Image: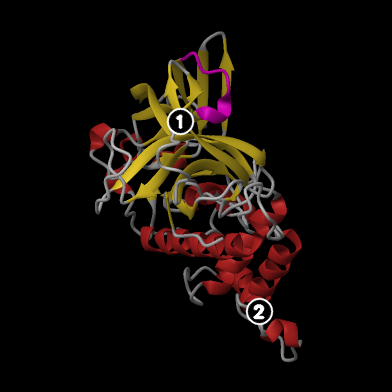
Amino acid sequence: MTIVGTASAPLDVYPAVPLALYAQMIHWDECAFWGVDRDRGAGYAEYGIWIKPERDMLRRYLGEAQSEIEAVVGYPLATRWIEDEKHPYAFPLLTKYGKVIESGVRSEAIIEEDAAVNHATDPATVTVTTTVTDESEIRVCYPTSLGVEGPVEISPSDIDIAAGTATIYIPRCRLVHPDHVDNPSTGLDYTDLTNFLEEVDVTRVTNDDSDQATLIWPHVCTGSSCSCPTCDDYTQVGCVYVANGEIGQLEILPAEYSGGSWTAKSTQCYGEPEFVTVNYRAGMLTTTRQAIDAVIHLAHAKMSPEPCTNARLQTILTQDQRVPDVVTRERINCPFGMADGAWKAYKFALSMKLWRGRTMGRRGVRV
């Protein structure tokens, strides 16, 4: 099976290692990481202040590392929606990525725009009324009213839902106002609340299973005629049955969606489609600690030697960028590079690789 094409959101929308998690994993003071100068006399002096270009560079390398590891393991390290992935039609069909959770597209609905942030405590709190019962569906973003190109998500430290009310906890330093994200090297004043957001947008992200697949017949009219060759195509929506989510095996048939349910659709006039585009959500339901470590090790190995002048970070980078004097043949051929961090990431990827063989489908099509 040949993948004709695929379209999906960039990895910074579905990161396996959000920046807030990265700071925790390397045991960095979070405020210093987000460019905020907290009380220097309270044990934070050893942590250098990160500036925006450094955080942007880190985000890029984390995304590159995640992409390279996913190419080896064969599935997303964090769940995400894959849309308009195009294949030659087969029954059954193997998707590009394994660990398919469900078919459909990403759907986002506003719970509350410009929800007030209460900075009386740290973490700050945001309280909204909602019918949502699953905390994992709630997202917090920079307010669209500020004109920020995005959406730009903010990572809460905790979300509690009780009796129709969601209380969202967000450490203050994760709430730097967009006007101040390009902070000076001396850091922003932690006690000055004008440096931080007063409002955020709270949304609900779910799966919309009304848009699962599109079957494509080239050079066929969309009218009632069965014989009308053109330079266009005839398309028909299809429904997806996830036959084996682990390996990404789907069965797709023509159907119509109405009133929350699917009904079969006859396309006898046109025969079997030639192509199909499919939408689905796939990936690790919970990104493991080993996967997180692998992404960070590889990102460190890819970084320039001086993303930060702080000696503490230099020590961390040196460990992952070290290349031993003697290396094995396997390590020389490691596609991620020969540095220690790259080798650790590659060994993880090989150990977690999803192996999928080609078999003959029910209709005699190789998948």
Task: From the top left corner, tell me how far across and down residue 18 is, in percent.
Answer: 52, 49
Q: Which residue is mark 1?
A: 266
Which callout, 1 or 2, points at the residue further toward the start of the chain? 1
Magenta-drawn segment? 130-137
Q: Which residue is mark 2?
A: 334
Which quadrant, please, contains the N terminus?
bottom right
* Scheme by which the image is coloured: secondary structure
Which quadrant, please, contains the C terminus?
bottom right
Front residue of this view, candidates 4 and 109:
4
Q: Main secondary structure of the magenta part?
A: loop
Residue type highlighted by circle 1: Ser
Would you say residue 242 is visible in this rendering?
yes
Say if mark 1 contacts mark 2, CB within 8 Å: no
Mark 2, other Cα within 10 Å: few <14 / some 14–19 / many ≥20: some
Disc number for residue 103: none
Q: In this picture, is 61 found above or below 94?
A: below
Task: From the top left corner, tell me how far across and down residue 25 is, in percent.
Answer: 63, 53
Front residue of this view, candidates 269 and 149:
269
Asked whether 346 falls inside the magenta stretch, the response is no
Task: From the top left corner, tell me how far across and down residue 10 is, in percent.
Answer: 42, 53
Mark 1, other Cα within 10 Å: few <14 / some 14–19 / many ≥20: few
Residue type highlighted by circle 2: Cys
Image-based side of 96 in relation to 146, left or right: right
